Amino acid sequence: MPDDEAEQVMRARAGEREAYAELFRRHAPRVGAVCCARLGWRGPLDDMVQETFTRAWSELGSLGSAERFAPWLRGIALHVCADWQRRSGREERLLVPLAEPFDPPARADEGDGPDEEGRALLDAVDALPEIFRETVTLFYFGERSHQEIAATLGISAAAVNARLGKARALLRESLARDA
Amino acid sequence: MNEHDRARLSAYLDGVLAAPEAQALERELGARPELAAELAALRTQEAALARAFAPLVRTVAERTRGLALPEPTSARPTVRRRRGAPLLWLAMGAAAGVLATGTLLDWGRLPGAPTPAPAPEARAALAFARLEQAIGAVELVSDTAAAALATGTELVPGARVRTSTGAKCTLVLADRTRLFLDAGSELVLAAPRQVALHQGRVFAEVQPSAERFRAEAGASVVEVLGTRLDLTQRIGEPGSENAGRALTELALLEGSALLCGTRVEAGQLATAIDGRFEHAREAKDLLLVTSWVNELLAFEPGREREFQERVDALLAMLGRTKVAHLYEWEIRSLGDHCALPLLRYVESEGSRAESRQRHEAIRILADVADVTQLAGLAALLDDADPEVRVSAARGIVRLTGGLPGDSPGSFAEPDFAERAARWRAVLDRR
């Protein structure tokens, strides 16, 4: 956690929205990664990020230690994703008898999206067990710091390294199988 | 290749392997071709993963640029707003109803609106204090029990009032001092001009008097004669510098106050810890610090001037800050209470010299206006500023559907005067 972050959290909790805006800028990619790991890369990531920060703003008072902001935010993001999954699950159940097999909107790959190789790779990431998927996604979403990922996930940096090593190996195996 | 090798290669790839171990691995790579091949494959995969994730990162960054928070549920309108009614006559009919009766129609209380207290004339003179309004569950608590508190209930000295999560309330004292209690707070009404905040947050509008108003917060004491202040009491978070200590924060909007015996001036945010004054600094924007009160103020009659001042101050900030969207959000969060102040601002002569703020104001007004602002919007259809005309037309279209063939954008064209006259004629007929 950067030195000034705890202070920013305290200021945001006191109602200073500029401080919260700075936290948003700093943590939005991280929250996007958490949502991506939970919903898959085709999920409505931007909406989930927005909803997470909206919800977090109203619940800042319930945050325990300011130093725990990143894992606390991750918890909210997971709840937001779970709510979305419940909602979309209901919609899916309603739609399936009336329509063709459900095809989730490929929002993230509209326009300037990943190429074919990238899509295959992202699909392979989506297929990883969750603990590896989240670590890998956090890493490639721009975190690139084992320490920061460790703080977000509430685990040690060594555990992050172990998960990344395993995840990379699993990805290689998966892609070799599909080749 | 085992788990240990994988972990080492992964750490080496990410540059987090300690220098001695990295050097040892580099020596090993020369002797173990399968290890070198694995590292090369990982590097290739690494580049491919970075390429694959890049568009996602970009998409999220672009679509969430800025903190475009939606309007909060606070400060909901007291009159149901008609959005995008398809026909002009529908809106005008409603407006005519307003004009004919001289009063707004009661379309019912919205979910989330506070339970109002009985009308003032129905009550006896206030002996000590009363729960004036409440949003959510408010309780009267003792050491052993808690009971739900109904709005309008008179309270006696020593009453301990608690708001649950998500609840807020307004308490009025016999001297007309008003206390706004935030969610998750507990306040004891000790004596006529004495309260004790056990936890949470209170915003006080203290009536001026020769007798000091005293607010205790833990071991800290705030003393004022008459002012508006925001007081917070909480315990330092575990693991923080002030873990377990009683933190008191005072934001003072007017005049001066004493916090633990030290003078605090208007515009300052002061802190005391465990009953000792720590420091005071200029608050960046007290309007935002105290915005949580708006949800309660929005339901109070006679606050029009306050809302006008607030909207004017927030509009002024739009041109001065890099986080203008936060101020815009704050304006929008006032719900219907911002519409009339925005219209008054756009109509004012003074605003014509502040074109940027004027444009922001009319843009927001176009989104939030209700039928009672239709006449005002119609009058702006031939404003000298094309952006104002277009936004005014957009607001009218939102409320009425507009006239076929005339888009809001057409009011930027040179023949706007003729078009404006036609629109106003239709609005007048209706």
Image (spheres, coloured by chain):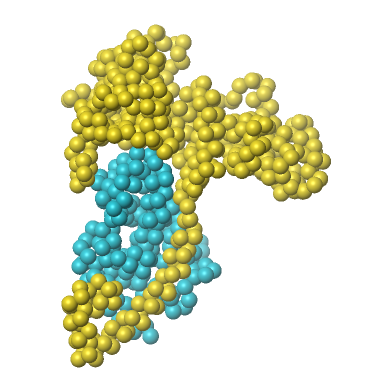
Q: In the image, A19: left or right of B409?
A: left
Q: Is residue B15 above or below residue B266?
A: below
Which of the pair B125/A90 is nearer the observer? Answer: B125
Residue B380 percent coordinates (x, y): 71, 36
Q: In the image, B142: left or right of B350?
A: left
Residue B197 percent coordinates (x, y): 27, 26
Classify the position of the C terminus of chain A by image quarter: bottom left
Residue located at (35% from left, 35% from top): B281
Residue located at (33% from left, 67% from top): A144
Chain B image colour: yellow
Q: Is residue A165 above or below residue B356?
A: below
Residue A172 percent coordinates (x, y): 31, 80
Residue located at (26% from left, 87% from top): B36
Residue located at (44% from left, 11% from top): B122
Q: Is residue B276 above or below residue B206?
A: below
Chain A image colour: cyan
Quarter where residue A62 is shown: top left
Which of the pair A108/B5 is nearer the observer? Answer: B5
Q: How many marks?
A: 0
Q: Is residue B359 above or below residue B39?
A: above
Residue B25 percent coordinates (x, y): 20, 82
Which of the pair A24/B424 is nearer the observer? Answer: A24
Visible residue check, residue B291: no
Quarter where residue B421 is shown: top right
